[in-house]
Amino acid sequence: MNMRKLPALLVILALLLCLAACGEAPAAAPTGTPAPTAAPATAAPAPTAAQATDAPASPPENVPVIGDLRYEETVPLEYADQFAIYRYEGGYSFIDMLNSDKILVVPEGKPVPDGLAKDVVVVQLPLNHIYMAATSAMALFDGLNALDTIDFVGSKNWYTENAVKAMESGAFRYAGKYNAPDYEQLLDGGCRLAVESTMILHNPEVKEKLIEVGIPTIVERSSYEEHPLGRTEWIKMYGALLGMEDRAEALFLGEVEKVRALEALESTGKTVAFFYVNSSGNVVTYKTEGYVPSMIRIAGGQYIFTDLGLEDSSKLSTINMNMEQFYNTAVKADIIIYNCSIASQLYTLQDLLDLSPVLEDFKAVKDGQVWCTTESMFQQTDKMGTIIQEMNRIFSGQTDGSDLEYIFHLQ
């Protein structure tokens, strides 16, 4: 070996040995021997409150996935069970009606997320040019001061004062009944949304046609709510649909307070029948678990039928029977209320007796406890608390009817 090269070779060998040593893992400490203490590392700064809030949270399992929008909250509902509202970042809302329509409300100026299911109805705010065929929703729009979002209506007969004025002024245009809309008029007028009631389910081809010609259509299901305040709580759905959530919440809470003031009252013990006679001469009354019997119970009365329709699983709140069947139970009722919000308006007790002579035998008739609703009562979805208060005044004997707005005394 050339002695001149030896120092260079030794240097290279030393370098190789150092590199090998650096690549080896440190040996494990023997059992029972404390491991060497590592040098303290610089701790990462704790996340600020804002950073913690911005971190994406996993939504509950039942929350719909809407594109890449981040879920924020589910709107709490106290009585309604026929819809749900989910809120997402950026002001988006998703309305899910039970076994029915799904609606995505897109804030003004915001894009529609990609990947939506074909059956999702997209509503871009601000919403206007509505065709209102669901009569029970009109009072809720009125309460929200949102009648100006409606251009077309499916009825000529309205009992909400501001709706009557809108018809008279021409602000509302009649565009055909719920089951026979004027498609051409709606299209020419730029209709952006049709709101139908569950009556349209008897004519599904009408909804299909509306969608086919390019008019998004939803079926509101407030009539399926069992609690009267469940119907009123639909104002939250319309508040989300119109971007008026805060006002909707305030109006709903106002009606809730009226009802809660009555819930602590003891029952008056008065039994009550609530009905009307249809064109065939049969009686139409309410199932025991329906929202009208619920109103009667909250108001301190006892619905005269204790188990009517309990085995019927359909969502219809009413039931038909012949006069004899009705007579067998209702003849003993302390108070009867005739439903003129659906049937022809009655004005006197004789008008009622003309419907069926056997009504003269009823205890309530003999005692002068026969009452009638106004035509407007069931269009007043936003006034359920007020109507229950009026029932309570009748059941507790605190009124002769002169100070009531939605129920009056038949004499």
Image (cartoon, rainbow, N blue to C red):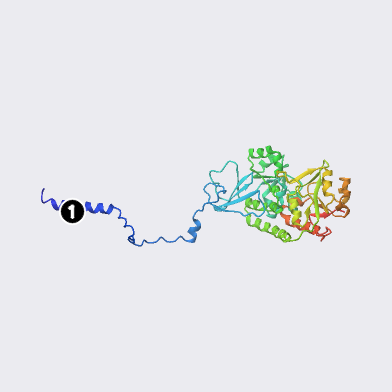
Q: Is residue 114 left or right of residue 40?
A: right
Q: In the rendering, at what x and y percent does residue 340 appear?
A: 80, 49
Closest to the observer, 318 or 237: 318
The residue that label 1 is drawn on is 11
Residue at 14%, 53% in the rendered image? 7
Q: Residue furthest front?
A: 32
Q: In the rendering, at what x and y percent does residue 179 appear?
A: 72, 40
Number of numbered discs on residues: 1
Residue 29 against residue 224 in the figure, above or below: below
Residue at 71%, 54% in the rendered image? 382
Q: Secondary structure at mark 1?
A: helix
Residue at 27%, 54% in the rendered image? 22
Q: Which quadrant holds the C terminus?
A: bottom right
Q: Is residue 111 left or right of residue 323?
A: left
Asked whether residue 126 appears in the rendered view, the answer is no
Q: Is residue 61 left or right of residue 83?
A: left
Asked whether residue 263 appears in the rendered view, the answer is yes
Q: In the rendering, at what x and y percent does residue 312 appear?
A: 72, 43
Q: In the rendering, at what x and y percent does residue 234 appear?
A: 67, 51
The three-letter code of the residue at mark 1 reads Val
Residue 215, by quadrant, is top right
Residue at 65%, 38% in the rendered image? 208
Q: Residues within 10 Å of mark 1 (few under 14, many from 20)?
A: few
Closest to the observer, 333 or 253: 333
